[in-house]
Image (cartoon, rainbow, N blue to C red):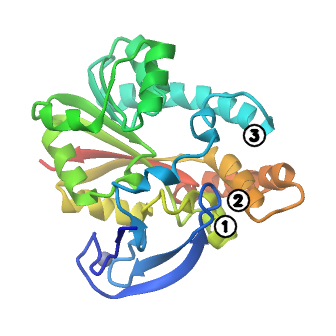
């Protein structure tokens, strides 16, 4: 197996990399992966993760697509309810930040197409990119949405999008700095870049430590904080214009984390911890389980 061994911090280039914890892939393989943190800038990442060419099998479990489509089970029902609310909230946020009702959107990592579909329904010109062929087929069948694979990215004209979104995608991308460069190139000078990622300084991350479901090794390669993602943006000529909490993620993440800990009542305990996490995020948004970061280009 080809793995990526990181010797220098992808954010600052420093080489003072310190072991923080070992996480288990509870979702697919049961394999162990170490997390390291750069002592110079604080950026945390998964060490020795499988390369892009081989990581596919870590996504292959029976419930990967169904994860976003069946309504079986309490956790999934709740997930659906929250998703609908979140889709509308995401759309409102973009309209508000951009200051116009429609525009051109590039949605990278569209998944099964729910967000792209929502925006298309609102009159947006949507370009959707998704790596998984099964997810692309799903989007076509359910929403009649044409979704491209990632090779399309190199054919897109410079500065052609008012909005680029990556909803829980950036933590999966092997070529992190190259991705930021590409985003800068594709975004209009007055456009907005919206990046949502888990927050490893959240209440629930600190509570669950190595069991925190959003470490999700080895699918999640990078473990951002409000501070490290802002530095990433700055490195690539973006300014962090706004940040918004996604406190509802704490419920789903806490339930999964309880399941990984083999708790007797993962649903009840997860709801309980999710509620406490929600209050923490209310008091301080930087403690939210996941965060939405909005970047603009530096002028
Ligand atoms: Zn660093």
Q: Nearer the viewer, residue 96 or 163?
A: 163
Q: Residue at x 54, y 66 (%)?
A: 201
Q: Nearer the viewer, residue 140 or 127?
A: 140
Q: Tell me whether circle 1 and circle 2 mark residues in contact (CB < 8 Å).
A: yes
- The Cα–Cα distance between marks 3 and 1, rounded to whole angstroms, is 18 Å
Label 3 Cα crowd, 10 Å radius (few <14 / some 14-19 / many 20+) = some
Q: Earlier in the sequence, mark 2 or mark 3?
A: 3
Return the residue at label 2.
257
Q: Ligand 1 is found in which quarter of the picture?
A: bottom left
Q: Residue at x 39, y 16 (%)?
A: 145
Q: Residue furthest front?
A: 1
Residue 143 visible at all: yes
Q: Earlier in the sequence, mark 1 or mark 2?
A: 1
Q: Position of residue 172 (x, y in %)?
A: 41, 53
Q: Residue at x 63, y 40 (%)?
A: 62
SS type, badge 1: helix
Q: Nearer the viewer, residue 85 or 156?
A: 156
Return the residue at label 1.
211
Residue 75, labelled with which disc? 3
SS type, badge 3: helix
- The Cα–Cα distance between marks 2 and 3, rounded to whole angstroms, is 12 Å
Q: Position of residue 6 (x, y in %)?
A: 32, 76
Q: Position of residue 274 (x, y in %)?
A: 73, 52
């Amino acid at each position: 197996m080809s793995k990526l061994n990181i010797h220098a911090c992808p954010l600052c280039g420093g080489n003072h990399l310190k072991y923080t914890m070992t996480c288990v892939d509870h979702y697919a393989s049961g394999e162990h992966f170490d997390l390291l943190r750069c002592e110079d800038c604080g950026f945390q990442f998964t060490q020795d993760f499988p390369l892009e060419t081989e990581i596919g099998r870590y996504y292959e479990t029976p419930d990967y697509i169904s994860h976003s489509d069946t309504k079986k089970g309490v956790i999934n029902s709740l997930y659906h309810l929250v998703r609908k609310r979140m889709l509308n909230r995401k759309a409102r946020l973009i309209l508000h930040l951009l200051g116009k009702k429609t525009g051109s959107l590039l949605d990278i990592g569209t998944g099964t197409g729910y967000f792209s579909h929502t925006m298309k329904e609102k009159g947006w010109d949507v370009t959707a990119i998704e790596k998984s062929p099964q997810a692309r087929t799903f989007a076509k069948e359910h929403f009649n949405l044409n979704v491209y694979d990632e090779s399309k990215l190199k054919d897109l004209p410079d500065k052609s999008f008012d909005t680029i979104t990556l909803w829980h995608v950036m933590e999966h991308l092997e070529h992190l700095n190259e991705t930021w460069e590409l985003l800068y190139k594709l975004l209009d000078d007055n456009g907005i870049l919206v990046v949502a990622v888990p927050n490893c300084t959240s209440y629930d991350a600190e509570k669950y430590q190595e069991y925190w479901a959003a470490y999700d090794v080895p699918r999640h390669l990078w473990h951002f904080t409000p501070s490290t993602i802002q530095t990433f943006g700055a490195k690539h000529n973006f300014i962090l214009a706004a940040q918004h909490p996604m406190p509802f993620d704490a419920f789903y993440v806490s339930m999964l984390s309880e399941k990984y800990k083999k708790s007797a009542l993962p649903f009840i305990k997860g709801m309980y911890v999710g509620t406490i996490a929600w209050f923490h995020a209310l008091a301080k948004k930087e403690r939210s389980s996941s965060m939405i970061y909005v970047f603009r280009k530096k002028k």
